[in-house]
Structure formats: structure tokens, C-alpha cells
Amino acid sequence: MTIDKAVKHGARLSTVLLLGTVLGGMPAIAQRPARPVAAATLLNPPPPAPAPQTDGGTIRTIGVEGSQRIEPETVRSYVKLRAGAPYTRETLDEALRDLFATELFADVQIRDDNGALTIIVKENPIINRVVFEGNKRIKEEKLTKELKLAPRQIFTRSKVRAEIARIIELYRRQGRFAASIEPKIVNLDQNRVDLVYEITEGPRSKVRQINIIGNTVFKDGELRGEMATKRSSFYRFFASNDTYDPDRLAYDQSKLRQFYLTKGYADFRVVSAVAELTPDRRDFIITYVVEEGDRYKFGDVNVESDLRDLKPETVKAIIPMKKGDWYNAKQVEDTVDAIGETAGLVGYAFTQVDPGFERDKETKTMAITFRISDAPRVYVEAVNINGNTVTQDKVVRREMRLAEGDAFNSIAIKRSQDRIQSLGFFQEKLEIKQTQGSAPDRVVLEANVEEKSTGELQLSAGYSSLERFIINASIRQRNFRGKGQELRTSVDYSTYSKSINLGFTEPYLFDKNIAVGGDIFRRDLNSFNFTQNGDRNTTYSQLTTGFQIRAGVPLTEYLSVAFRYGLSQDKISLDKNTYFYDPNGTGVNDTCDPLVAGRYLCDALGDRTTSSVGYSLVWDSLNNRIRPSAGERTVFSQDVAGLGGSVRYIRTSGETAKYWDLGRKFIFSVRAEGGAITPFKGNPPGRGSDTVRLSDRFFLGEPQIRGFDIRGVGPRVQRVPYVVTTNADGSTTVAESTDRATITDDALGGRAYYVTHLELEIPLGAGARELGIRPSIFLDAGSVFGLRYPDTQDYRPGDTRLLRPVFGADGARQCVDMAVPPALTSAVGGVCPTGTTPYSTALSTGFNEKYYGGSAKPRVSVGIGFNWNSPFGPLRLDIAKALLKQKGDDTKLFTFNVGTQF
């Protein structure tokens, strides 16, 4: 509440403006009724009024005036004056100082009437409320939480100074060193005040320049690249490391030292690091003064081991540095860790590895001796799980690769961390800590987990470049009842597909390492073809109803096998009013017309039942199945249809992925997959040239290969209409249409495919990571092929094969009498009367179907991807350019997918 607002509400107010600063430039408050005074008067206690001129004497009485909340006796207790005791001017001055020291009074005076002393006090006011104005970057809730002054507390000068210092510190933590606070008070009745902090936040103080003095070996730019702090620039709009942070300044000094030590400069030191605030308090200029020193090489590298099971010869085999190599302190640290892990493999958890250095300044060499101290072989005493309130202990323990009584093994500890993290039930950066047990040869393992939400109740709507508008309703619990079970149900609706699915997975059946699960589903898919202007025409509908049950068991730590059985019924149909005709005059359109639908679509029609059994072999060594950064995963799968049902084929597929952490949060991945389908003898053939039905084939395009449209790669038929042009001399010319909007495009799929992806995830600053922004660059390559050449059609205008008979209401064939005017009659017994001819209509002016895309040659695209956990929901953007393509392929530069929750 400002002063103007208080007057508006009719309170009895007197305004105090704060005009000065005290204690290192800190704003101050002044309080006097009716007019502004110097700020220092309020934040600093006023000097005690001089004691009345007196020669001293004996105190007859001590009275108190002006106290309201404080009892007079309490006021008298704060001073050393007592009735009957002598007093002097000095004792009165001391009494004034004692009263001001209590910080209970705004003003104090002592009146002396010949020994009758009167203490006149003015009590500090009570705070009615605390108001913040001008704060946008830091919310009021956070400021209130940090401050100590609150309503109904006593206003004191020292507390206000402390509060201002706290607010300034909060803004400095955000890099806003130009922030200023102007406190004001609004006097109310009953000795109450409103305390108002008027905040000028100012801009974030950027790092304008980073200067380095004393470096001769490495350039400034190379050294600045090693620092966490970056210079402010226009393109760092997502970065947060271009603001000044004292902690980051200290970290950068250690980064500089670490960099030089990895290059052999063992004597390097940072002489000074100074951050200077520019006069406008908007930017900082940081200056480092360094001494590089001499460059050293490794001298003799030796190992001394007191462990019985770890011989020096064994350790030397894993030491990477050799005599004569340039000295590298990071390599020494990594070697110490590697020796510790090696000792952990043979059961030593608390092995002490000390590198001993012998520096020879004359030869510029650094000899190292790794000393491995004796330690007992360690066994696991206990495994403690902390922090899980929903997840049952057994869910975490069954992912541990070590149990009570096992010999300690560092590799098993790392594997346990990866497996627990891959559950997806806990926050990232899980670490299993190792602490000393009850004896030197005992270790206690503690998995400190922090649970995150595993239940998802979602109603979402969005727009996808693949399926246009999407509506999704789903309920999913990935940790059902805290047992690690997954229960899910979902309903999806879009322009081209509708589905409902119910599934359940039990990862440990009867607490045995056997995973079982099942799904029941119904999917209604409307396929579509593309016209060249980007429009879509719905072609056929595929309605699938079925279920699948599955089970899996591990064979080794990284290898597992899964089995499944599925039964589904497919019904593929076309709109009879559009794609069917009546060839016999039955009054029912009961025959698929290849002139309208295409022979390849007519071949796909019908009902069929697929009963299939399959298995998958899975090798999985990923460090995290949700967001891997290291490890690999390979899956080989086969499904055989023919255990009953009407479809017979064997489908074989494989996929593999490998991830590398390149450091500095760069993650590189290589993924590849491929497959083939082969029909069994006896598989019901279609009427076309390929016995693998359209709905069983592989299709490729977006999103498998970015840069191409959905089903935009591989075998396809384009139907190009003929155009008849009348020339000036009355003759006609027939030519294929060049209007891309009139050409339809049907993807046919293939019997085999392969896809390869290379992707590099690029880290951004901390601010971008907090927003969930993850860009990447990628290369995709692949192809789908193996389809037998389909039956295509070529009908020129006037071709009699384009004619369809016309039937009357009675179902009889219509005949035309060519007299003038022409007249229609009905055939009798299927025969036209004398003088008439069968009447037919042309369905088209003609068209030519062309087959493209059957080549196994790779299609290649490159591009950039952009993942963002936006406020509107997950957003994925891809911009990809097709570098290699085949005639007939459909390319696409930009794709996106976004949704939102409501």
C-alpha cells in the first residue's frame, strides 16, 4: 500500500520518504510526522539527547511518560538508575544509551527536576503489514519466506537494514547487481505502520568481457572456452551462464587449472581473479592473471600394491600413461579411479590408492608411483533402501545385483544403479552410496531414491502433421500398487484412426524373474493416398480386433527372451458407393472396380484371421532405458502366422542401438533396424501378383525417415490421367496430365526394409535444460523394397475397357436406339432388340498407372531436431532435407507434433 493509496482510504497518515543510504550504500528510513527527513535518522538510532545539565545529586523518584505497550516498571528495569541512589550527568547518558540499545524506542529523553527524574519514551511502532512493490522477477511468496519482519512485530531500524540486505542478496543471486530498495513507511493510528519496500530490480548484470593476462601458450578464446562463464552475446538468449556469479568465478579458476594440468603445466596457478562492476552497474568485466610455468612429461610410472589379489603387473596393464608422454593430471585421476574399480572387482570396496609425485625441475619430468594400501576383502553387510514411500522395497531390491553376504563388486554396483534408474519410478542421478559396516570387511549399501509421479491421467488434444487433429484419453499407472506393475488403458481418436487398448504387465510373476502381460485392442484405421498437391483421399478401411499375451525371462544379466501369441481379425473394405459397381444388373454394387480403386487395392479386400506366435531375443546394456547415454540394445524377433487362422507368413526383424557419452553432455547414437516377410506355401494369394497382402507389408517414411512424408518411401503406383486437347484444325491430341493436383499416389509397401539413424544430441545452457529443450542433428537412411511388380493399367481415351453397362430400374440391360432422337429400351433375356445396341457409360477419359520406388537403394536425409517440454505439452520439431531419393518418393521439409493437457 503506497502513501497515496493510504490517503485514499482515509487513514490518518504521515509520510516518511527515505532519501539517504547507510552502511555501505544501503537505503535507509526516516520517520517524522508530516514531512520527509533524512533517511539516516530512521535506520540509524538518533544520538541520545544530552542528559540535562546537572551537578548530580540523589534520585528522589523515577517516572515514565509515553509508554503505551510497555509497562513503566519494565522501562525502569532497562536502566541502572534507582531511587535513593546518587546520579550524575554521566549516569544519565548511560541510561539513555541502555534504553536505545533495547531497540524498543524511537526516541528517549530524561527530564530532571531536582532529583525527580522522568523518562520520556516514544515506542517503536507495530508493523501492520509488509508490502512489496516493483518485484516481478522474484515473487512476493519467496521474498516473504526469506524475510523475518512480519505483521504484528515491532518495527526496528536494525531489522529493516537486515531485511534490505537480504532482498539485495536475493537479487544478486539472480545476477541483478543494479537492484535497489527504497523502503517507506505509512503511519497509521494506534502507533502502527505499513512497511513498504519499493524495489527497482534492474537488468541482469551480464559479463561484458573476460580478460586473461599472462597466457602465452594458449589463446584467450581457447581458455574462455574452458570456462563455465561466457561473455554476453545476442545469441545467448537461452543461456544463463553469461551473468556474473561469484561461485562460478571460483569454479572457472579451477577449470583453468584443470585445463593446464591436462596439458602438462604442473606449476600453473591463477595469480588473481577480479570482477569489476561497470559504473552503470549493468555489466561485469572479469580479469584473470595467470602464470603458466613449465611443461612437464611423465617420468617413471610404477605401482606398489599391498593387496594380495592385485599384483603390480596386473595394475600396470591398465595404466594408460607411459614415460615420455606429456603430463596429464586428469589422466592420473582417471587411473586412480580405474585402479579402485579394478580392486572392487575382486572384492575390495575401500581400497586406498595414493599417487606419489616426484618432480624434477631440471629435466621437466614428473615420476609417479601408485601406492595401493592393504585392505580387507569386503562383503555386503546390508542393503538399505531409503526414500521410497509408494514403491515396495522388493521392487528396488530385485534390481540390485548384490545382496547381503555377497562379495563386494564395483561393476555390480554400477549395474544396479542403471537398472533402478531404468525403472522410471525415481528422479535422475540416483547413486548407491557405500558406507563402512560394523567391521572393516563389511560395507553397507544405501540406495537413496526420490520417487516421482508414475500415474498418468491425461485428457489431451493436439495437432499432428501425421494425423491432423488428435484427441487422446488415457489412464496409465507404471507402478501399480507400488509393485512395479503397469496398468494402462487408452482411447485415441483422429481424422484417420481410432483405437481403444487395455493392457497389463507384471514384471515379476510370483516374485520370480518372469514377466507376463497382455493387451486387448480394437483399431479402426482409414488409410489414405496422397495427391501431389498434398491433399489426402481416404482409400480403404482396416478394422482390427484382437489380443496378445506375452511372457519373458532373462537368460543372463544382459540377455533375455520373450514369447508372445496373438490372435486378430482384420476386415479390409472400401466404400461400395465409390469403388464398387454392378456388372450384372443385380441392383447391388458387389464388385470392386479396379478402374476406380486400382487393382492393388481390390486385391487387399476381404476378411482374414491372423493367429501368430513369436519370440524376441533382447540384449540390453543401456545405462538408462528412458534416456540412454551409454550402452547398447539389440533385438531379434520372429513371428510366424499360420497356427490356425487364414494367413500364413514368417516375419523376421531386428534392431540395434548404441549410445556414446562424448562428454560435456554430448550424446551420439547409432540406430539401425530392418526386416523381411515371407509368405508360406498355402498362404491365400491375392488376385494381384504378390501373395503378401497390402496390410501385412512394411511401409516407410515419416517418422522413421525424416525428410520424407508418411509412407513416402518405397513401392508405389501413381495414376496419371490423360488429357484430350482439341487443336485449331479440329484434330485432337491425347497426352498425360502435367497437373500434379490430378495425379493420385498409392503407397504399396514392400516385403523388406532397412533404416539407419545417426544422431548427435547437443547440450544447451542450464536455462535451456531447465525448460526441457534438447536440440539434435541427425542423418537418416533407409529403403523398403522386395515387392513383386504390381499389375498396372493403361487406358487411353475411347478404350472400350473403360465402358460400364447401364441397367434400368428393372435390372435389365439398357439398349439405345440410335435414331434421332436416341431412345433407351430394355434388353429382353439379356439381348438388345433389333436396331439397338448395348448402352454403356465411360468411367474415365483414360489414365496410365506407373510403378515407382521398388529399388533397394538408400534414401538419405539430414536435418535438425528440436524437443521441448513446452507449457503446452511435449513439442517435437524436425527440419530435414532429402539428399538421396528415388523417382516417386514424397519428400517433406518440416514436420511437427504438439499436444496439450486440459
Image (spheres, rainbow, N blue to C red):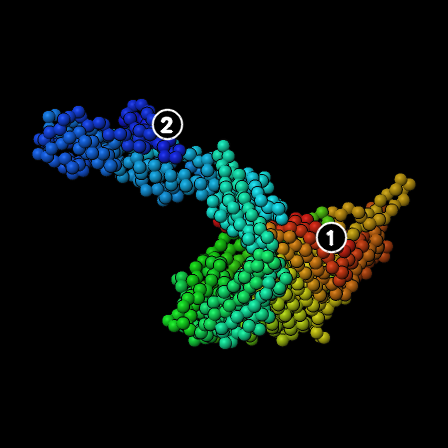
Which amino acid type is shown beneath numbered disc 1? Leu
Is residue 635 positioned above or below 283 on the image? below
Outermost residue on the top side: it is: 35
The answer to which of 88 and 618 lies nearer the viewer is 88
Residue 67 at what x, y percent from top left? 18, 32
Circle 1 sits in a helix, a strand or a loop, which is it? strand
Whether residue 886 can be seen here: yes
Q: Residue 112 in the image: state x and y as whole percent.
A: 14, 26
The residue identified by callout 1 is 883
Q: Residue at x 78, y 58 (%)?
A: 851
Q: Residue at x 73, y 68 (%)?
A: 691
Please, which residue is most extreme toward the front here?
A: 362
Location of mark 2 (residue): 19
Q: How far apart are marks 1 and 2 (CA)?
A: 69 Å
Question: Is residue 304 positioned above or below 720 on the image?
Answer: below
Most foreground residue, 29 or 561? 29
